[in-house]
Amino acid sequence: MPNRRKFIKSVALTGVSAALFPNIIQAAMPEVREMTASDLKLKNGAVILLQGDSITDAGRDREKEDKVNDRDMLGRGYSLYTASELLAVHADKNLQIYNRGISGNKVYQLQERWEKDCMDLKPDVLSILIGVNDFWHTKSGGYAGTIETYINDYRKLLSDTKSQLPNIQLVICEPFTIKGGKSLDNSWYPAFDAYREAAQTLAREFKAIFVPFQSVFDQALKKAPVDYWGADGVHPSIAGAVLMKNAWLKAVGL
């Protein structure tokens, strides 16, 4: 019964459009459009790849990672909800959507698996959400990386990708925190803000669409407390994941 209730709740939320949180998305909208290079163009048969850490991973089934548009492969987070809406709204385009996020990843770990988990798929659209672990693991995981490490590693990853796939459309998602969450404390700020700013700068440099998740969650906290959106401040709840889906689709112009 608990699983059934969770499933029903999840299905109910996935069917909701951005109108569920109109004030939240609208309040963030000027910043979204200001930071967006251009609207996403989806050709027939486009391959869309969602990459990142645990927020993208969201418990996806590794055994099914090569099964395109598979529910278990897409996980239980914003990747599933984003893919679900794209597939439903653009049913005539034969979209091919993959989730290759891995929990705990930092940018250099994306690079280590990039040939298999990106280049081999030849995506037309690549969306990356990475950065929270690049900071978090310096505090609790023994990682010695700095903001300069993050920027240099990320720039190399994007440069390598563009050199091999020159026509790829990039979507860079802002690493974010849901302020007040249990895994956060005052020592996160302003240090973590540098990672957000770096992602935005790289989006401009590589003419990528930028998804400003931080401003979206900052607005969301005016409507409901942190536990509603993601209790630990890093991993979104169902409502938080749907909010991310709405923000992603709005940012890319779909």
Image (cartoon, rainbow, N blue to C red):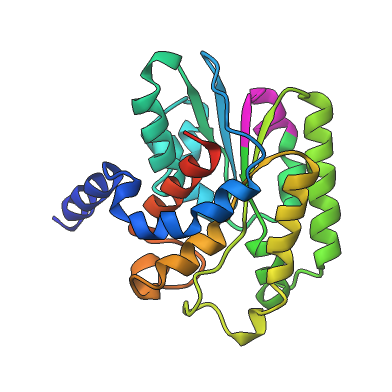
Asked if residue 9 lies left or right of residue 84, the reply is left
Query: Which quadrant of the figure has residue 124?
Result: top right
Near-viewer residue (166 or 122): 166
Residue 188 sits above or below residue 248 on the image? below
**76 horizontally vs 213: left or right:** left
Q: Is residue 134 visible?
A: no
Q: Residue furthest left?
A: 1
Residue extending farthest bottom: 186
Rendered location of residue 66, percent (x, y): 52, 27
Image quadrant assignment for residue 214: bottom right
Residue 183 picture location, percent across and down:
52, 77
Locate residue 213 relative to residue 243 in the image: left or right: right
Please give the name of the residue rendered at 84% of the width and 28% of the height, measured from the top-left corner.
Answer: 163
Q: Does the magenta portion include 122? A: yes
The residue positioned 50% from the left and 28% from the top of the image is 97
Q: In the image shown, does 110 or 253 lie closer to the viewer?
A: 253
Does residue 87 belong to the magenta stretch?
no
Q: How many marks?
A: 0
Point out the image quarter for the N terminus. Answer: bottom left
Range shown magenta = 115-126
Identify the residue at image location x=63%, y=63%: 132
The residue that appears at 62% across and 55% down in the rendered structure is: 174
Task: Name the spot of residue 94 as percent of width and height, x first.
Answer: 45, 15
Q: Tell me residue 233's x, y (percent).
A: 49, 71
Q: Is residue 24 visible?
A: yes
